[in-house]
Image: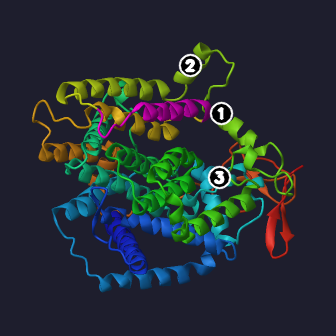
Amino acid sequence: MNYIFFFLFFFILFFLGRGLLILIDSFNNISTVDKKIFGVNSYIFYPSISLFFLGNISVLFNFIFPLKTVNKWIFLFAGLILFVNFLNIPKIFSKDFLIVNFFIPGVMNVTSYNIWLHYDAGLYHLNNQKWINESEIIFGLGNLNIWFSWSSIYEYISAFFWLDDNFLLLHFINIIFFILFFSFLYFQINQNQSKFLKFSSLNLILFGIIDNFGINGGGNGFLYVQTVGKPDVSFSVIFYITFILLINSFIENDFSIKNLKIFLYLSLFSIQLKIFGFYLVPILLIYFYKLGSPFIIFKKLKTFFAISFLWIIKNFIISGCFFFPVEITCSPIVSWYERGRANFARSVLFDQHIAYNFGDSIQEWFSLWINHGKNTQIYTNFLISILLLALVNSIFFKKSNPVNGFNSFWIRLYQFSIVFTWFLSAPNSRFGMIVCLILISTLSFKHLSSNQRFKIFQNSTLTGLLFVCIILTPRFYSYQSFFDEPFKLSQIETPEQTYINSKNGWAVIPANGDNRCWVNLKCMDIERYVYPENLNSYKIFKSES
């Protein structure tokens, strides 16, 4: 049953995204539907386009309505867009289409067997989505639970896909981004226009295969299947694709307004998923500079600026910050923000993930960090992996001179800043996935215009390696569960929780020292003296101070 539900879910998103692109093409008098862009068929982006659309239209409506009251109208509108596909009948059924839309989704759907909710789903994700469904936007919602202040677009997307008490569809969202990632790699290894994209994709495929071997059974920082509710994989995929395509533009000296618009929307999606997406901004600014006269594009970006503006206002209403948890973007003037709360949230993350603080002994900090959680296992395996892949690159590919005068120094400096910031903020494996992808994918900088020393990496060989990587991505226990009960519909449900009354007389808090509310709008993760008040027709949770 999982397969029936998933492929129905997948192809509704596929054709919704395609219908949206048909409408966009007609308004702009261009043709991108079912065409190649950046060396890949545009149809690999259709499901992600749908999720971006659904997430942002949820943000828009939630300014005025609880999402559950307008869901049926949004679904009706989406249904009308699906019919737009009949105006441009797809002619895309080919070997490539079958691989990226049937084989890859079919394998990745195995991960929906024997999967469960992430700890943070109970801590704040599910309740955040419940608030989106049950109420129009709430001023100071972050005061009820500080982690509501993140307010990722992933929450607005997920709020659409509650299946009564079964949260299986939330895992399907994550699978969509795995499919996008592997589909992107598939097309890059089978094209020959950009050796950088081809070889960087090969390095990631080999990295993904090596992920299954090593200390304690493997795990080296490659994308991994998370338990349900987290946006880390979706963020890593969107950030990586944007990053690698931007870098390839510099290598190829290829700059255009059309591509800039795509990069802006991809970057916006990345930022909406996680604030770490802002690290794409420096590369975008250089792209602007290289373009020569980028400002002529501004008048063509009304929708982009409108979405960005609404997103920033939404952030401010919920958290008191334009970009939480960046304290400088917060306003203590409003009654729902207390000065220093963003810094407090950052300090909690720092302590939780053993981030480095300036002035600390590097040796003592590193000893604490490397022995924290699974860091020894993952990052020892990563070090072995990157050294092994560097050796493979030097053996099988000839070193070449820079292409089009490309100087990799600035990219290396950018990579260093990413790694450095990661160590200073939240250096754990979830946040580290994108760091590892960036470092591995750029190993091929020295081989930008070179050929192979030995003709072993033919397209068919590379495709075979990709298939191995994909098949090894689901965990063994998921395969075992699938083969045991292939026709079962997985049930991903919240556990029973016990609550006690809060001292503020309004809310409850989890009992027995737990801090997970799961799905209970009157629950706070810890004791706080906050409660809802009326602000005209809206609710507000004021700061405790």
Outermost residue on the left side: it is: 455
Quadrant of residue 56 in the image? bottom right
The 10 Å Cα crowd at callout 3, few under 14, some 14 to 19, many 20 or more, is many
- Residue 236's place in the image compared with 211, above or below, is below
- Residue 187 coordinates in the image, percent (x, y): 25, 54
- Label located before the other in sequence (2 or 1): 1
* Location of mark 3 (residue): 150
Whether 490 is among the magenta residues is: no
**x 29%, y 38%: residue:** 403
* Inter-mark Cα distance, 1 to 3: 16 Å
Query: Do we see residue 520 in this rendering?
Result: no
Q: Secondary structure at mark 1?
A: helix
Q: 345 or 85: nearer the eye?
A: 85
User: Which residue is more in the foreground, 180 or 242?
Assistant: 242
Give the residue furthest to the front.
Answer: 292
* Mark 2 → mark 3, Cα distance in angstroms: 28 Å
| Residue 300, horizontal then vertical, whole percent | 51, 70
Can residue 166 be spotted in the picture?
yes
Q: Quadrant of residue 45?
A: bottom left
In the picture, measured across the screen, residue 467 lies left or right of residue 427, that is: left
The residue segment tinted magenta is 402-425
Nearer-the-camera pick, 119 or 399: 399
Q: Position of residue 529 (x, y in %)?
A: 86, 52
Which label was assigned to residue 350?
Answer: 1
The vertical placement of 503 against 440, above or below, is: below
- Labelled disc at residue 22: none
Residue under label 2, please give it. Answer: 366
Is residue 421 rendered magenta in the image? yes
Q: Secondary structure at mark 3?
A: loop
How many angstroms separate mark 2 from mark 1 (CA)? 14 Å
Task: Evaluate if marks 1 and 3 touch, with contact meaning CB atoms under 8 Å apart.
Answer: no
